[in-house]
Amino acid sequence: MNFINKLNAAWAANDSLLCVGLDPDLDRLPAQFRGTPDGIYRFCTEIIDATADLACAFKPQIAYFAALGAEGQLERISAYLRDKHPHIPLILDSKRGDIGATAKQYAREAYDRYGADAVTVSPYMGSDSVEPYMEWNRGVIVLCRTSNPGGSDLQFLEVNGKPLYQHVAQLVADKWNGNGQCALVVGATFPEEIRAVRAIVGAMPLLIPGIGAQGGDIEATVRAGRTDAGTGMMINSSRAILYAAPQAGEDFAQAARRVADETRRAINAHR
């Protein structure tokens, strides 16, 4: 099953637009997982099991694993997700942006090594930086209007009367989405830009970071980004779910489930 079909099925099966981010921070992990060779794996898989029926996708951020030399644990987490919850898409958040042979290796890393259904990429180097991913017929999620304030430094530059992020959205919708497996990253911190992107790309899925710890408004996000079918979004929350319990608490998975369910319900209230 390709990425878009799998995502559509997850939206329906779990009645959810919530994407759970996996950003393991050693300083915030429960004590029982620190200093152990498989602590990150155990923490993330327990989070997955606790929230899998509430999520439309899981999104590991590769930097959190690579910085700790934990890529092997990420491989095991990815395999676990495919084995235990195969209906939930896995999005590798790596924001790769190179070209040619190097981009081919990044694509192989995402789709072959980690078995990702989709990967985030940067469009700054143009179509050359996206085409190697298209060869796999997997999901390609292109940065468009990111949630950070500094994104405006480039994304709001005017080109032929329109901000650059809108040109990116148009390029992806009209030219780069040849296999129908593209999506865009648009931050929840900018609901009016979400609305503008939705108007350009139709029903194309949007990966929307920025709620929870980054302060994005759920109601404004959903109203700006929902499709006519009430879907079209993967609204990501990471730290607010992962670290919902006190550091010393033993109920981290239950706390994560509670916050994930609260977030899902808040999203659904405005669909």
Image (tube, rainbow, N blue to C red):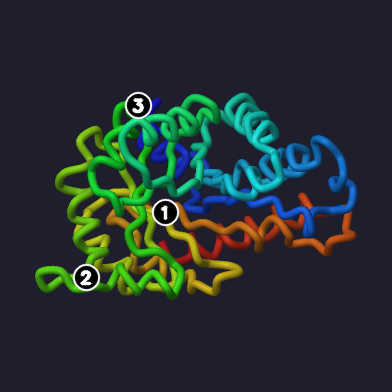
Outermost residue toward the front? Answer: 101
Q: Residue drawn 44% across and 35% down?
A: 106
Say whether residue 255 is left or right of residue 235: right
Type of the residue with mark 1: Leu
In the structure shown, which secondary structural element does the residue marked by tag 1 occupy? strand
For disc 2, the neighbor class at 10 Å (few under 14, some 14 to 19, many from 20) is: some
Instruction: Give the quadrant of the N terminus.
Output: top left
Q: Label 1, on which residue? A: 207
Query: Which numbered tag is attached to residue 163?
Result: 2
Q: CA distance from mark 3 to mark 2?
A: 31 Å
Q: CA distance from mark 1 to mark 2?
A: 20 Å
Query: Which numbered tag is attached to residue 136?
Result: 3
Say whether residue 217 is left or right of residue 227: right
Q: Nearer the viewer, residue 271 or 68?
A: 68
Q: Nearer the viewer, residue 244 or 264?
A: 244
Type of the residue with mark 3: Trp
Q: Counting residues from the N terminus, which is met first, the one under dot 3 or under dot 1?
A: 3
